[in-house]
Structures are given as C-alpha cells and as structure tokens.
Image (spheres, rainbow, N blue to C red):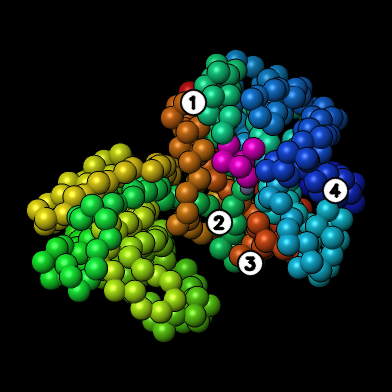
Amino acid sequence: MTDTVAYLDAHRERNLEELFDFLRIPSVSAKSDHDAETARAANWLADRMREAGLGAEVLPTDGHPVVLGEWREAGPDAPTILIYGHYDVQPAEPLELWSSPAFEPEIRDGRVYARGSADDKGQLYMHVKAIQALLETTGSLPANVVVVAEGEEEVGSPNLVPFVERMRDRLAADVVVISDSAMFAPGQPSLLFSLRGLAYVEVHVSAAKGDLHSGAYGGAVPNPATELARMLTTLHDAAGRIAIPGFYDDVVEWSEETRSAIRALDFDEEEFRAGVGSPGLHGEAGYSTLERLWIRPTCEVNGLLSGWTGEGAKTVLPAKAMAKVSFRLVPDQSPARVAELMEAHLREVAPPWVRVEVKELHGGNPWKADPSGPLFEAASVALEEAFGRAPVIVGEGGSIPIVGDFERILGCPALLVGFALPGCNMHAPDEWFTVENYERGTTSLCRLYGELAERLGSAG
Ligand SMILES: [Zn+2]
C-alpha cells in the first residue's frame, strides 16, 4: 500500500485534471439534445478505463449505453468485485443560480464546483483512479473487478435491470460496491446500512353521479370529501403509529446495537427543526428523529383533491374526492403487500354510502445491509486508515431501487460507501465535491478492494 499511496500522491494533479475533463462533458441524460454529449462521456470514460488497465467496452442499451470495465486476471477462483456508478448527470438549470458555470469546474475553498462532481462522476472516477494506482504499483488487483457505469441513473435507470439480467453471467460477482451517497459529516466516513422502499396508491371516493347544490342536496346525500378525510384520519393512531392492521408484520426491528449506534451520532434535532421551518417535529412515539427517517416506515398523504378550490365561495356538494398516499417502507416490507393491506383497510373503514377505488401506482423494495458482517468490517478497516476515523453507520430515508435489483439478480450483497458531504447540492445549483474526499476516498478504495478480497476469498 505504501507504493500505491505514494503513486496517488505523485499523481494528484493529473487525477484532478482528468476529473475536470469528465465534468466538462455535459452528459445530461434527461435531454435528448445532449445525447451526443452523453455518448461522448461514455467513450471518454471507456478510454480512461483502458488507460487505467481495464478492458473496456461501450455497450448499447435501448437508451444511453453502459460502459463496462473488466479486469479478470485474478483468475476464476478469486472473488469478483462489481463496482456500479453513473456517468450521466442531472440538468444544470436554473443556470443563473450557479456561482460558476455548471460544466466549467472550478476549485473554491477546497471544493470542486461542477454538475456531477459529487453525483456521481467524482465518486465513480475515484474507483477508476484507485484501480489504476494498484495496477501501476503492484501489477495486479486483489480480486477480479468489473465496473458497470450507466448513463441513465438520473432518469430512473429504465434499461439497467434488463441489461443486468441479460449480462447476469458476465456480471456475476461476490459484492456490488456503490459510491453514490454521502458521509454523515465532514471527516466522518460513513457506511449506508438501510434504504427505505416505496408504495404509492391513489384513493378515489365517490357518491353522487355529479356535483350537486349543497343547499338542495346537502345533509341527505353523502359528501366524498368528508368521508375521504375521515378515512385518512384512521391511517395513524394518536402515538403516530400506522393503524392499518398487519402493517408492521414484516417490519424488521433493528438490534439494540444498531439503534444505539444511531443515537450516538452527533445530530442536532433543533437545527433540523429550524432547517425545515416547522413549529415542531412529530412522528412515531418511542423513536428518535433519525430512527423515524431511517428505520421506521411512514404513511404520508401527498395530495388531496375535491370540490371547489378556486376563488370565492361556491356551494357545491362534490361528487368525488381523491387522495394520493405514499408509504416509505423498511425491510422486510413489500410494496405489493402494503398496497393490499391499505386497500383492505380503506374498504373496512369506508361507509357503505360511498364507492371506493384504490389504484396502486408504483413501488420499490427497501434494502438493508448487515452492519456486523464482513463487508462492513472490510470497509471499516479501509476507511479508518484513509480518514483516521472509524466509519459510522447511516440510513437513507429515500429509495435507490437499483441496489435491491443488483442483489436480487446477481445474488450477492451490496456495499454502499459514499464520499459526498451533507449540503453538497446534488441535483441543485453549485454542486460540489471536496478535493480532500476525492483523494482520501481514492486511497481508501485501494485498501477496500484488498480487504474485501481477503474476506470474500475465505467465504468461497
Ligand atoms: Zn447519483
């Protein structure tokens, strides 16, 4: 490792300049008039992978191509590490809110400002540079390595699952490493141990065949707005728990060890409250704010629609009402099961004088890692050495469906180790990534591959 660290140190400038070149290519996957640029980013990345010592191909999909990098000289008996990242970026608009142009990277106060610096070009490119450093200083890698860089993450990865399914044999791996997330705080390396899933339903309540005069009919004909509101209030109890029968059946209760690790994080509740601007915080009784965000499921009304909502008074008895309701799910809940329970509950609480229709819109599975398993152990050693501090575990309230998809299709666990920082403006103007994390993170990845290979090797 000493040689590899010295090599990275000697090539700091080059590694930054190359990242700048990558960031200058506006590979905005959502915009078809940028398709040539997105393709250019894929080819640029494949060229840099080849320079790093990987075999690289740009493989077509029905959308933007996948760049596949491979190094298999560790042999068929050695473990295989699959690295996933994306070379596409979010649109940069609104451009006028950027302090420097989105595709002209600039360093200010130790931060690289550019679209894609944190999400995800910077973090993806660290892996390429780590691989190159190891190959140039040791002549080999501690495991077989496959890099899958997609160009459609920012538009929902429509072609990635079919790609992984089609390439299942070639992509067979012992672990999927993903660097596309953030650390808990500056200088504090972090490992992601859970992601929430999603179930989304639309509820329609109707009564009369059309809107009616609220004087001529009100009081005798049911009001769908009132009935829907009443039904929605049955979704939670007074303690903030979700009151749908069976809802918690599949919810994993995390160990006391994990919960105390979350409680030990330096999290300022009052700063969080002030940041969102609400007079108070409220959620499920018995859990801290971070636990409510990371390891507990939610039920949220996302939208309500009924009757007259325009200017002035219109005395209407609405014929229908609609609510959009989503659930953030935790392991081992399933979106289909939750949608089913929701529908059964609504039918149970709905009065017989209205019609109820429940439509399932879409869903995504939650994900969890084993914080006491060998992958976290390997990452802890690598991160602590590079950052001088042991990593903490963090959850993510949002959803990244592809993580579960990789595990399901390839039958191996995922390890999420990210190097962005809170407030780094992913998807927003003035996105940034620190030079320090780019460099320290690259060093930690060199060590990570070795630590992973050691543990995966002994597991077969
Ligand atoms: Zn990303």
Q: How many marks?
A: 4
Crowd class of label 4 (few under 14; some 14 to 19; many from 20; radius 10 Å): some
- Check disc 4 and report the residue beneath it: 24
Whichever of labels 2 and 1 marks the residue nearer the N terminus, that label is 2
Question: What kind of residue is marked 1?
Answer: Leu
Which residue is under mark 1? 410
Q: Earlier in the sequence, mark 3 or mark 4?
A: 4
| Spot occupied by residue 160 in the image (x, y as percentages of width and height) | 58, 30
Q: What amino acid is at disc 2?
A: Ser
Q: Is residue 81 above or below residue 437?
A: above
Q: Nearer the viewer, mark 3 or mark 4?
A: 4
Neighbor class of circle 3 (other Cα within 10 Å; few <14, some 14-19, many 20+) is few
Q: Are marks 4 and 1 in contact (CB under 8 Å)?
A: no
**What residue sits right under mark 3 in the picture?**
423
Query: Does 91 lie within the magenta span?
Result: no
Q: Which residues are magenta?
A: 152-157
